[in-house]
Amino acid sequence: MISKMRPSNGGSRIGIVFNGSPLFSGGAGSGESEIRRWIIDNDMLEAIIALPDQLFYNTGISTYIWIVTNRKPKERKGKIQMVNAIDYFEKMPRSLGNKRNEISDKQIEEITSIYGKFKETKNSKLFDNEYFGYTRVTVERPLRLNFQASKERLENLEEETSFINLAKTKKKGAKGLKEIEEGERLQEAIRKSILSIDSEKVYKNREEFIEVLKKKTEKQDIKLKAPILKAILKALSAQDETADICLDKDGNPEPDTDLRDCENIPLTEDIDEYFKREVLPHVPDAWMDRSKDKVGYEINFTKEFYEYKPLRNLEDIKKDILKLEKETEGILGTILDV
């Protein structure tokens, strides 16, 4: 529909009836979010009007009118209006399928008037375009592992693909008369090397454990290749918050993918300040991987028009329960007698 808009001669204005999904479905970087982002970045979203539910014959869901235009008046430039018209309806004398409500002509005029006045009221709110945007920031925490050469952990190694594939390795024997199962021999030598490490000791530093492991394998005349070493470390390790941080070859902390999280930080906020205020007090060792930043847009209609309704007083609830008990006295006895 936007592609059919007149680019000149006054431009165009479109009214589209949607369900709630286009407001928020899809995270940052998804197709849905990118469409919202493109429309808002190009300042084409003029207003969204929330309608009552049960307006249509074949569905009872809530619907929304999007007003999209390439000819915003000066006062609406850079702004989006949200109109809450969910209470503007009348009950139909007779339902038609899921259609139980209808909007009267007078109510249509009232909704149109709210939209046209473009003012902040109970049912009308105005927002800057960037208010609905956010940066999805990846938050990393360091990898902390302990290592133990126990029989229980050694069993995990039997499920590692790199270790399993060793059994497929074969080497020609003398003069090619026989084949030696080199891979199986290597597997067994690795098992013996690991079992020769103190099974009771828990290593909380990866480099220290690797050094011990290599000394044991060298005695078995084994030179561990990177994929096999990686498989062994994975099998013999467990997460441990008290362990030393695992470092990469450059001496930087390695991220723990199991602890990886994301924060949606509003475009209106400074990302570094938000991180210091909302994240670091809870996880002081965390850091942001800004190379993975994604900008997204979503519109949370319910949040903007939410009205807190206090819970009923406990004393009132107690009175209602006692009243119901009094009204039902004798009914159970009557049923049992029958």
Image (spheres, grey):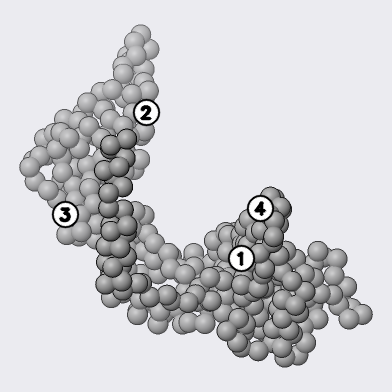
Distance between mark 1 and mark 3 Cα atoms: 48 Å
170 sits left or right of 194 in the view = right
| Residue 334 x/y as whole percent | 30, 42
Three-letter code for the amino acid on which mark 1 is drawn: Leu
Q: Which residue is mark 1?
A: 23
Tell which of 306 and 311 is nearer to you.
Answer: 311
184 sits left or right of 27 in the view = left
**Label 4 element class:** loop
78 sits left or right of 291 in the view = right
- Near mark 4 (Cα within 10 A), the count class, few <14, some 14-19 or many ≥20, is some
**Circle number at residue 165:** 2
- Near mark 2 (Cα within 10 A), the count class, few <14, some 14-19 or many ≥20, is few
Residues at discs 4 and 1 in contact (Cβ within 8 Å) = no
**Circle number at residue 204:** 3
Is residue 228 depicted above or below 260 in this figure? above
Distance between mark 4 and mark 3 Cα atoms: 63 Å
| Residue 213 x/y as whole percent | 18, 42
**Label 3 element class:** loop
Instruction: Identify the mark nearer the N-term, 4 or 2.
Output: 4
Residues at discs 2 and 1 in contact (Cβ within 8 Å) = no
Residues at discs 1 and 3 in contact (Cβ within 8 Å) = no
Taking the spot 47% from the left edge, 74% from the top edge, the residue there is: 265
Examine the image and state in which quarter residue 28 appears.
Answer: bottom right
Q: Which residue is mark 4?
A: 98
Distance between mark 4 and mark 1 Cα atoms: 23 Å
Three-letter code for the amino acid on which mark 2 is drawn: Asn
Three-letter code for the amino acid on which mark 4 is drawn: Asn
Examine the image and state in which quarter residue 23 appears.
Answer: bottom right
Instruction: Identify the mark nearer the N-term, 3 or 2.
Output: 2
Of tags 2 and 1, the one toward the viewer is 1
Three-letter code for the amino acid on which mark 3 is drawn: Lys
